Image: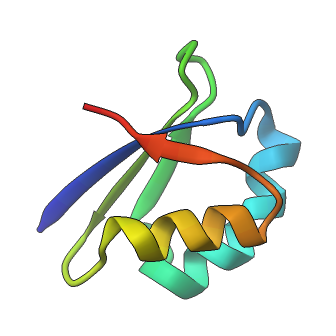
Amino acid sequence: METLKFKTNIKCTGCVAKVTPELNNTVGEQNWNVDVENPDKILTIVADGVDSKTVLEAVNKAGFKAEAFD
C-alpha cells in the first residue's frame, strides 16, 4: 500500500462530510483520513494505484484545497 499525505484546508467534521463523497469515489472508503486536530489538517491516503494529481482534483472538486505534505 502506498501512503500519500496532503496539507489541506479541511477544518472540521462538516468539511470532512462535504469531501467524503469525492474521496470515497476516488480512493475508496476506509482508505483516507483527515486529522482535523493537526494544525496542518493532514489528509492521509493509504491505497494502491492512486496518484497525487487525482487526489488533488477530488479535493478541489469538493471545494477545498490541498498540497503535498512531506
In this rendering, position of residue 2 left or right of residue 52: left
Q: Quadrant of the C terminus?
A: top left
- Residue 12 lies, with reference to residue 49, above or below; the image says above
Q: Quadrant of the N terminus?
A: bottom left
For residue 45, say whether it is visible.
Answer: yes
Viewer-nearest residue: 7 or 21: 7
Instruction: Please say which color scheme the image uses.
Output: rainbow
Pinpoint residue 4: horizontal percent, then vertical percent: 28, 53
Residue beneath the point at 45% across and 77% down: 54
Pinpoint residue 29: horizontal percent, then vertical percent: 50, 75
**The furthest residue to the top:** 39
**The furthest residue to the left:** 1
- Residue 61 lies, with reference to residue 12, above or below; the image says below
- Residue 70 lies, with reference to residue 15, above or below; the image says above
- Residue 32 lies, with reference to residue 25, above or below; the image says above
In this rendering, position of residue 3 left or right of residue 58: left
Residue beneath the point at 53% across and 21% down: 40
In this rendering, position of residue 17 left or right of residue 70: right
In this rendering, position of residue 30 left or right of residue 15: left
Query: Dividing the picture into quarters, in which one does residue 41 lie?
Result: top right
Residue beneath the point at 64% across and 62% down: 59
